[in-house]
Amino acid sequence: MNSVTAIARTDIADAIHSRTLWGATGLMTVLVAISWVGLSANLVEQADTPLLTAIDSFGLWVPLVAIVLGYEAVIGERESGRIRFHLGLPSTRRELIVGKYLSRVSVLVTALVVSTGVLVVLVFVRVDEIPLVPLLSAVILLALYGLAWIGMAVGVSSVVSSKTRAVAAVVGLYALFGPLWGQIVLPACTRFVQLLTGTTQSVDFARLTYADGPTWFLYVARLSPLEAFDAARYYIRDLLEIALMGGRTTAAHGPNLFGLAVLLCWAIVPVALGVWFFDRVDLE
């Protein structure tokens, strides 16, 4: 654990000195502020969840910032030769990856905290109120979403043999879970379900929502971290309201809890696979 902490602290210090931390924070803040300017012009005054509506813009920007922060976490050390220095210290390959993961998470969380703070101020100026429960739910969801994408980026960085392949892999994941998910993956799943059930009913994905989608759709759609993030925005708020003030939610627990579990798995499983692979690879 001491080695993990030392690696994480060193990496965070490098991020500060190289201005990676400041760049990530500034970029996230600017992107979110720009998104809010466009959103606020059409925001309904009586909307009871303007903050959660605004948080939707993070769905696009968090993955991009996480990819930039995490894609070279391990492979960058291999290509620069610094990995021999790290492994020459009393630390293992597993500790190196975990330390890198924690440092990149710390940088991303810092960027999220600052940009969320700016967003809270912008929303408050617009609607004169920031309810506590939506704010807490936004913080929880953003933290889990950021962990998921950092986990994927660091996991990829642990198994590839060059930065070029790391970039190709993480960009491919972003494309798969983003634009290709609704255009290719879900239609392919629909066709598969139709073959299994013998049905021929067509599905219009452009109009399909979580409220009226078939049961399988509610689960398969949430395998994408972007979809899981979008679906969980109001569900986490509902859970907090139940825990703090009582009441009930009309949202289906099964698919929504599955979506939260998916985000947690994306935060852990790629890193675990990266550790398993990296322990067995020959370092040149």
Image: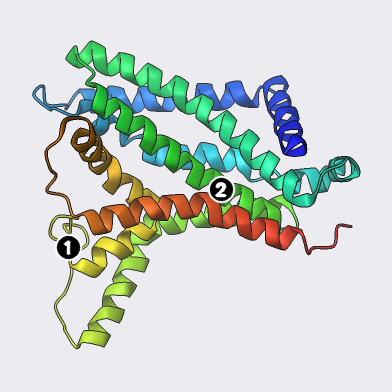
* Residue 51 vertical placement versus 259 (above, below): above
Identify which amino acid the numbered label 2 is placed on: Gly
Asked if one can make out residue 246 in the rendered structure from this viewpoint, the answer is yes
Q: Which residue is mark 1?
A: 213
Going by the image, does 227 lie left or right of 163?
A: left
Q: Nearer the viewer, residue 283 or 265?
A: 265
Q: CA distance from mark 1 to mark 2?
A: 29 Å
Asked if one can make out residue 178 in the rendered structure from this viewpoint, the answer is no
* Residue 217 vertical placement versus 140 (above, below): below
Q: Residues within 10 Å of mark 2 (few under 14, many from 20)?
A: many
Going by the image, does 245 lie left or right of 36?
A: left
Q: Nearer the viewer, residue 133 or 47?
A: 133
The secondary structure type at the circle numbered 2 is helix
Going by the image, does 220 lie left or right of 164?
A: left
- Is label 1 or label 2 in front? 2
Q: Residue 115, how many percent across, how many down?
A: 43, 22
Upstream in sequence: badge 1 or badge 2:
2
The secondary structure type at the circle numbered 1 is loop
Seen at 64% across and 46% down, the residue is 71
Going by the image, does 215 lie left or right of 71?
A: left
Identify which amino acid the numbered label 1 is placed on: Gly
Quarter containing the N terminus: top right
Q: Residue 32, how many percent across, how many down?
A: 38, 27
Q: Which residue is mark 2?
A: 151
In the rendered image, the residue lying farthest to the left is 46
Q: Residue 65, how many percent across, how many down?
A: 52, 36
* Residue 167 vertical placement versus 24 (above, below): below
Q: Residues within 10 Å of mark 1 (few under 14, many from 20)?
A: some
Seen at 14% across and 44% down, the residue is 249
